[in-house]
Image (spheres, rainbow, N blue to C red):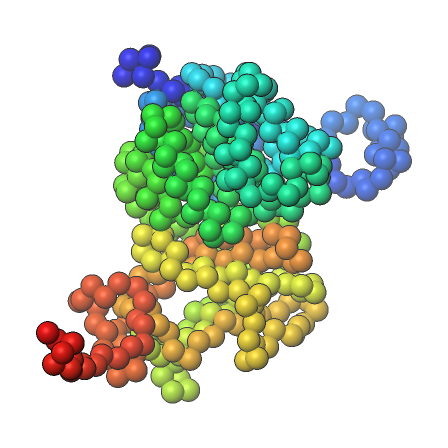
Amino acid sequence: MSSSDVAIAVRGLSKAYTIRKGANDHNTLAETMLARVRHPFRRPASERFYALNNVSFEIKKGESVGIIGRNGAGKSTLLKVLSRVTEPTAGEADLYGRVGSLLEVGTGFHYELTGRENIFLNGAILGMRRAEIRKRFDAIVDFAGVEKFLDTPVKRYSSGMFVRLAFAVAAYLEPEILIVDEVLAVGDADFQKKCLRKMGEVSRGGRTVLFVSHNIGVIRNVCTRGIVLGRGSVEFDGNALDAAGHYMSTLSAASREPVADRTDRSGRGSIRFTDVEVRGFVGEMSAPLTAGSPAEFVFRLSGWKPGVTIHLIICDGNGQMIAHCTPANTSRDDNIERESADGCEIVWATDELLLTPGSYSANVSLYVESVLEDRIDALVNFDVLPGVVRGRAFSSVSNHGCLALPHRWSVRGLAAESAA
């Protein structure tokens, strides 16, 4: 690969953080200062943690590359280093071209400035002339859908408005390299589709896209290449389909670990998943999961707070999301009252499991008043055995897709004049 073809060159990149043990033993400044006076020569114990460890790869101009990995693998740290948000501890990363990045909500925006002012500010940061920004201004506003709020300080924007404007700015100011973290998940489904289409256009236009997502189906559809990170190092680098398969195998291995011991999780952590049980039923008896039969997912939590909700995402064997369930979409049959102040169980149940025979996984997220407390991908892997859905048999030897939709067939005759 000639140097003129390279958009991003990463060589021996490492990022280390110092974790001080016992740093939270003193709750106030006075306690901390008193401890320093009493023990002036005592140094707190510390540990060196490598979020990235000797990462190397090259990305060609025009490539669309997905960065995949379990929680804590180093994906977001890598993007922050590439976007110059943080400096590496060792190694180097060279980017050849103007960079537009969308990382955490708010990155690159000044909260006191209006939406209009932030568009021009970001363009100036990218080195664009004011005339260039004006040329793209209407397209940015139209894509973001924030025309009514252009002259409102962005500190008053909702997270969804913030992300829409930030993505529009990053994509339409035409950087040679577009870096996008999974912050797109904040937006609604229609906006996510618009963003994915736009990233496809950017890539087809000869620009480079670097994209982090937990949605393997999106990685497979949007990206041509995948890089799998694990514990700060590159585990796999190849085409997107093979990268997705490698990642799914790591999730499968992780799902066999006790839930309480899982480290590939994210969130504030004041309430966490401690266990999960998946069970099917034949009559009143427990049984393996079977297509068309009742099923339960029992999630055990370490505690309870008002406003707890769980998002259950069921994925197929390729990591493609096929169902999303949450108590936010309640019905009169739901009963999600608190059971215990110390810990509790939340049960997701269905009277008729409408999945065809095959292998599946469940990603789960735990929120309290819209704040993420715990998230684990592939919390559990499970198999669905052949069964019967409303009189229609589904076997494991036929390709029936993933969903066993209840349906019926009928044949109706046509009148003679209609047939003619």
Percent coordinates x, y for residue 104 in the rendering: 58, 37
Q: Which residue is pictured at 59% across the width and 46% down the height? A: 160
Q: Which residue reaches farthest top?
A: 3
Q: Nearer the viewer, residue 144 or 242?
A: 144
Splitting the image into 4 quarters, where does residue 382 fall?
Answer: bottom left
Q: Which residue reaches farthest bottom?
A: 283
Percent coordinates x, y for residue 74 in the rendering: 49, 35
In which quadrant is the C terminus drawn?
Answer: bottom left
Q: Which residue is pictured at 18% across the width and 82% down the height? A: 412
Splitting the image into 4 quarters, where does residue 24 fall?
Answer: top right
Q: Nearer the viewer, residue 196 or 420?
A: 420
Q: Which residue is pictured at 23% across the width and 74% down the height? A: 394
Q: Nearer the viewer, residue 170 or 376?
A: 170
Q: Which residue is pictured at 42% across the width and 47% down the height? A: 193
Q: Nearer the viewer, residue 224 or 71?
A: 224
Up/down of 326 relative to 106, above or below = below
Is 233 on the left or on the right of 162, as rendered? Answer: left
Is 91 on the left or on the right of 315, as rendered? Answer: right
Splitting the image into 4 quarters, where does residue 114 fall?
Answer: top right
Percent coordinates x, y for residue 73 in the rendering: 47, 38
Percent coordinates x, y for residue 31 in the rendering: 86, 37
Question: Visible in this render: residue 386?
Answer: yes
Q: Which residue reaches farthest front?
A: 417
Question: Visible in this render: residue 384?
Answer: no
In which quadrant is the N terminus drawn?
Answer: top left
